[in-house]
Image (cartoon, rainbow, N blue to C red):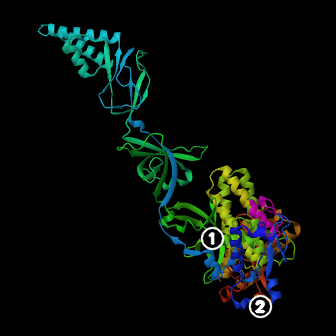
Amino acid sequence: MLHRTLSSPILFILILLVLATAGQAGAAEHDHDHGESEAQMVWICSMHPQIQLPEFGQCPICFMDLIEVARDNNDGKRHSLRQISFDARARKLAQVEVVPVIRGSAGVLTRMVGKVDYDETRLGTITAWVAGRIDTLHVDYTGSLVEKGQAMAEIYSPELLTAQAELIQAVAAVQNFQNSSSEILKNTVLRTEKAARTKLRLLGLTSGQIGEVIKLGRTSDHITLQAPMSGVVIKKNVFEGMYVKTGSPIYTIADLDHLWVVLEAYESDLKGISLGQQVSFRVEAFPGRPFQGEVAYIDPLVNDKTRTIRVRLNVNNKGGLLKPGMFVRAQARGLAPLADNNLPLLIPVSAPLLTGKRALVYVQVPEEEGVYLGKEVVLGSRRGHYYEVKSGLVEGELVVSAGNFKIDSAIQLQARPSMMNPFLVKTGGEKEPLPQLFSAKLQGLHRLFVKLSEQIHQNDAHRIGALLTAFQDRLQEMADAKLEGEDKLAWQELAMLLGGDVILLQEADQPAERDRLYGAMAEHFHKLRRHYDLQDVEVGGGSQEVRLALGSLMEVYFTIQNGLAADDLQAAQRGVAQVEVALKGVLPHLAASLAQELAKAGGALRSDDDMEAIRTAFYPLSQALSKAVADLGVMGAGSVYQQFCPMAFGNTGATWLAENEEINNPYFGAMMLRCGEVQKLLHDEV
């Protein structure tokens, strides 16, 4: 059945690529022990890479023949779970090319579609100014070209006939009484003539037509309607013989020398569009011929169904090539606003393997030619031939711009995380215990996620933003976690995925989008919980009242600790003087044994003691507070770390609490300020 597997040319190429990663081809390969060579190979299914068997057979899922690939067991030297090595032959076969990540101001390329439309400011309508009958239509079909002042139609109107007779009589009266000695009479006939002229003008006659009536001295029962502008007749509403009422539309004329192009732009692309910007577009009627328009209007409202915004261009159409209704494909090139005037990171459009806003990029490991590892990145706008990178890469990294699909395919065949294969949690087997500090921070990250989940369901945007920032800060704090082997690689993979989730959630402004992105983040965090066997956590320990009281006591404690570390006796004494008051707010809320221990430790401190006496009494207070913070939690004191110095008190060792990971030894001060280590994270403030 092997012929079925090799029948696909693409699959055959992929197999060659994977086999080429096993090492350099040459005679040296054949010098290896045959048994050792077999031990370094594994049989996998090309459709289900998670199936890995030590010998040839069939996939238990799809029953395809398994293929033999090299087993990469050198996890100790791996930089990532998504890492793969290609020798020179494999790189040539895959046509791999790399380019550096750069900073630049490449223009944002915004693609839009739309259609040509009439310029609404250049539409003219001919209406009936007087009721009557359409006797003649000089323009009797739509599409006719007309010039301004051209006769369009003749309307018969008895009302017009009466108004003309009134004007002729008024003009005759003016002539008859122009020599009258009565000023009142002369003014009266002049006003009558003026009113008759105005009446005819309101009935639709032009000044020339009114003059013609006066000159001839006879009435006409028809009025000629003239075109108010040059253009094309796009609508004809009447036929000869029809009766019309005052205000009835007869023709609509459009000036096609100037048109609109109405485009639809996604709201995420608006930062690349601005008023006055020149936009190029093409129509299918003239392939390869570019047209140009200027952005004259951006709709202030978003279409809530399509999530698009209308963008209108003003277009000069003197040649008459564009017709209203034509479909348009447009491209706008502009510069997106820069954050803090910093140029964005850019990678070629061929580099990322796109999966929405999240994308996979392969980078070459520095100083290790042919070694590539995958990174999930968050992309911004497309800028011409580049994509903006919001997170996941740094300037100068070498990204694979050609051959990335083949690299991804080869990684898929090794059942490692890739564009198509998610990170798989390995179950069973004994695991090495995690470093205590990392484990404590991991539990803190777990508590943050639980709180974030609560706020997502409550849709509290402000609180969600604060928790996402705290989550992001914690991920950055844990970036240099001192892990080894599989735990290290798994943490890098999961932290990368969660970091991308946070950035996308921070950009989401709609509840539906936020819920969708949170679903992906929850899936990634679930994998983290399974891999590190995280148990359910309680958010908070004691009541809010006792945690606030402990927070006030911790502020006093840190005053003493900082004073001792700085060898500042006065500062330490000021803190000691406040301990008694701070304890009164805490002790009533504690269990009897813990309250007794804390009261005893606090009572041993005296504000008039010297430096050594305060340091001696500071240790029992540190022990009691460690228990209280671990059991009950604290509010308002920030993160609380437990630190340890093995040389304190004659090498017996002593612990203390600190606000951060930096070692500031209160038992030795400047003499051995950095002596000590971080033991655990007792509390992390959200």
Residue drawn 43% across the image and 29% down it: 235
Q: Quadrant of the C terminus?
A: bottom right
Magenta range is 522-545
Image quarter of residue 380: bottom right
Residue nearer the viewer, 574 or 66: 66
Number of marks in the rendered image: 2
Q: Is residue 542 left or right of residue 210?
A: right
Q: In this rendering, is residue 129 above or below 111?
A: above
Query: Magenta segment: does it hold 541?
Result: yes
What kind of element bears circle 1?
helix
Estimate the spatial distance between the alpha carbons at disc 1 and disc 2, rounded to whole Å. Answer: 32 Å
Residue nearer the viewer, 424 or 337: 424
Question: Can I make out residue 375 in this image?
Answer: no
Question: Can I make out residue 189 in this image?
Answer: yes
Picture disc at residue 32: 2
Lower sequence index among marks 1 and 2? 2
Q: Which residue is mark 1?
A: 404
Residue type pointed to by label 2: His
Q: Is residue 321 left or right of residue 266?
A: left
Dot 1 and dot 2 residues touching (CB under 8 Å):
no
The crowd level at tag 2 (other Cα within 10 Å; few <14, some 14-19, many 20+) is few
Query: Magenta segment: does it hold 399?
Result: no
Percent position of residue 443, x then y: 78, 68
Q: Is residue 36 left or right of residue 391?
A: right
Q: In this rendering, is residue 556 above or below 614?
A: above
Percent position of residue 29, x then y: 73, 89
Residue type pointed to by label 1: Asn
Q: Nearer the viewer, mark 1 or mark 2?
A: 2
What kind of element bears circle 2?
loop
The crowd level at tag 1 (other Cα within 10 Å; few <14, some 14-19, many 20+) is many
